[in-house]
Image (cartoon, rainbow, N blue to C red):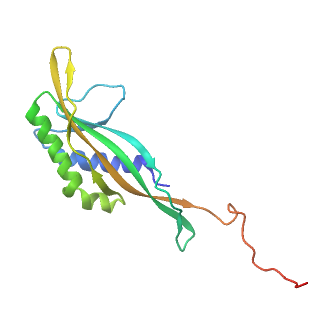
Amino acid sequence: MFDMRDNEITIVDGLKAYLSTEEKPCELVRANQTGPIPAYPYGAYTVTTPAQYRGGTFSIAEDGTRYKSVLQIWSFTFQSDDYDECMNIALRAYDWFQLAGLTYLNDHDITVRGVGNINNRDNLITIEYEHRNGFDVTFGLLHTIGVTEEELGGYIEKTNLKEE
């Protein structure tokens, strides 16, 4: 099985480091959580599809581990009180998933299988706008299951067959 928390830390820390500068950090937070809102600009993410069914069966490695590729879909939204800043952060994040972050993610056994279009997700907050732009990313992960022979019911080592 892949470790959801480890993957989350890998993706968020890598993207945050790429988007942040010393003068202007860019926090990334999980959406739909209670707590203080970070300073602008910031990004929020949601894992919309933790594991997408792809059909097929598990393959078996030499050590008996079963493995199968799994798709996982995340939605990223970048927010600011300034339109240009918001768009530029979203574009930089888009670039990270398209090219700049690919080696980093691959080194952590995460592949980017697709990046959706950047969409406007602006929000009217009473009398002013919160500028929001975002996109979805599809990740490829390797789902592994270590199954022992006992869990599978064992196997027959030897038998005697008699013909009748």
The count of marks equals 0
Q: Nearer the viewer, residue 43 or 57?
A: 57
In the picture provided, is 122 more to the left or to the right than 1?
left
Report which quarter residue 41 is drawn in.
top left
Most distant residue in the right direction: 164
With 106 as the anchor, is 145 left or right in this view?
A: right
**Percent coordinates x, y for residue 149 in the rendering:** 67, 66
Q: Position of residue 19 (x, y in %)?
A: 17, 45
- Residue extending farthest bottom: 163
Indicate the position of residue 122 as horizontal and vertical percent values: 19, 28
Query: Does 144 sit above or below residue 131?
Result: below
Residue plotted at (29% across, 25% down) = 36
Identify the residue at horizontal 45%, vertical 51% (top origin).
Answer: 3
Q: Find residue 86 and report its image quarter.
A: top left
Q: Residue at x 61, y 62 (%)?
A: 147
Residue 20 seen in the current view: no
In the figure, 66 relative to 80: above or below?
A: below
Where is residue 80 drawn, in percent x and y? 16, 30
Farthest top residue in view: 126
When the figure is inspected, residue 134 is found, relative to residue 127, above or below; the finding is below
Residue at figure coordinates x 20%, y 42% from the top left: 118
- Residue 118 vs 35, above or below: the answer is below
Residue 111 visible in rendering: yes
Q: Pick the quarter of the image with the C terminus.
A: bottom right
Camera-side residue: 20 or 164? 164
